[in-house]
């Protein structure tokens, strides 16, 4: 008697689905689904649909500010710095200033690092201040790095973000918190991606749609993913 077990191709390949929800919010789907930085449609996100009905196992938020930690349905959300475990996923939250004044204006943001489908992921969507050396070591060499690039009061600008990328040495960079093209949004201080890309000439740039699958066995190196 020969038994044949059918395994989904995604399980063999180790695919990780990334779906952009706008602003700095993403849904990351592998064996578990993680929602990053759900927002209220205000400020730079005023023209977007709030991702409040998105199904996920849990939320990772940079802070409780409305543009990155909006959780009106009180879903399971990790937001405070610390080490947590959700089933087989170990989450590490590191405190980084949310502004260039050591957090004196907007407080501290939580930078998250975790492994999902054998990929190390770092999410710096809410950070705008300097990291200490211990944080740099813990966050170094991720497979996927989400980082804000649009400037303004609560986001790294293109030069600051490029310096962090060169320090952390990720394989894939996913910029967040910037405006598309030359768009102007009322009550928004973000710029476009031009300054960041100008300072990242050693990286390839891939322009994507709203979603993309990463194969953990064939991951891109030195590549920037720009989601629509």
Image (cartoon, rainbow, N blue to C red):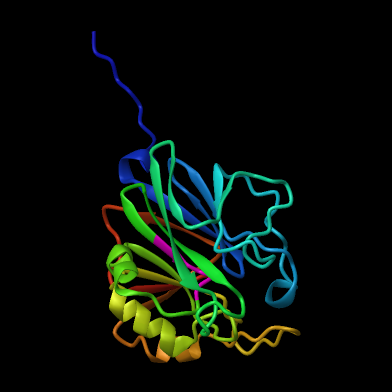
Q: Report which quarter residue 196 is drawn in.
A: bottom left
The percent coordinates of residue 4 (x first, y second) are 30, 20
From the viewer's perspective, tell me whether residue 55 is left or right of residue 15: right
Instruction: Quarter of the image for the N terminus: give it.
Output: top left
Residue sitting at x 64%, y 61%: 64
Range drawn in magenta = 122-127
Residue sitting at x 38%, y 90%: 199
For the view shown, which residue lies furthest in the top direction?
Answer: 1
In the image, residue 183 sits, relative to residue 11, either above or below, namely: below
The percent coordinates of residue 97 (x first, y second) are 50, 75
* 121 vs 21, nearest the viewer: 121
- Residue 153 among magenta residues: no
In the image, residue 120 sits, relative to residue 228, either above or below, namely: above
The percent coordinates of residue 120 (x first, y second) are 33, 56
Residue 133 in sight here: yes
The percent coordinates of residue 126 (x first, y second) are 54, 70
* 34 vs 65, nearest the viewer: 65
Instruction: Quarter of the image for the C terminus: give it.
Output: bottom right
In the image, residue 66 sits, relative to residue 13, either above or below, namely: below
Q: Report which quarter residue 140 is drawn in.
A: bottom left
* Count of numbered circles on the image: 0
Residue sitting at x 32%, y 62%: 143
In the image, residue 160 sits, relative to residue 93, either above or below, namely: below
Residue 228 in sight here: no
* 78 vs 168, nearest the viewer: 78
Q: Report which quarter residue 57 is drawn in.
A: top right
For the view shown, which residue lies furthest in the front direction?
Answer: 104
């Amino acid at each position: 008697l020969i038994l044949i077990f059918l395994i989904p191709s995604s399980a063999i390949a180790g695919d990780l689905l990334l779906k952009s929800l706008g602003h700095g919010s993403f849904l990351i789907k592998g064996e578990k689904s993680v929602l990053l930085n759900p927002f209220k449609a205000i400020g730079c996100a005023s023209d977007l649909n709030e991702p409040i009905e998105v199904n996920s196992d849990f939320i990772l938020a940079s802070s409780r500010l409305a543009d990155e930690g909006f959780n009106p349905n009180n879903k399971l959300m990790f937001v405070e710095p610390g080490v947590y475990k959700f089933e087989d996923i170990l989450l590490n939250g590191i405190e980084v200033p949310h502004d260039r004044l050591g957090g004196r204006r907007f407080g501290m943001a939580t930078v998250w690092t975790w492994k999902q489908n054998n990929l190390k992921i770092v999410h710096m969507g809410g950070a705008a201040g300097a990291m200490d050396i211990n944080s740099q070591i813990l966050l170094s060499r991720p497979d996927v790095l989400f980082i804000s690039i649009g400037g303004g009061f609560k986001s790294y600008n293109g030069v600051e973000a490029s310096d962090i990328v060169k320090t952390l040495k990720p394989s894939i960079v996913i910029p967040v918190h910037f405006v598309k093209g030359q768009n102007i949004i009322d009550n928004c201080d973000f710029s476009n991606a031009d300054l960041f890309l100008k300072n990242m000439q050693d990286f390839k740039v891939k322009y994507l749609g709203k979603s993309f699958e990463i194969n953990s066995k064939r991951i891109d190196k030195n590549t920037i993913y720009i989601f629509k």
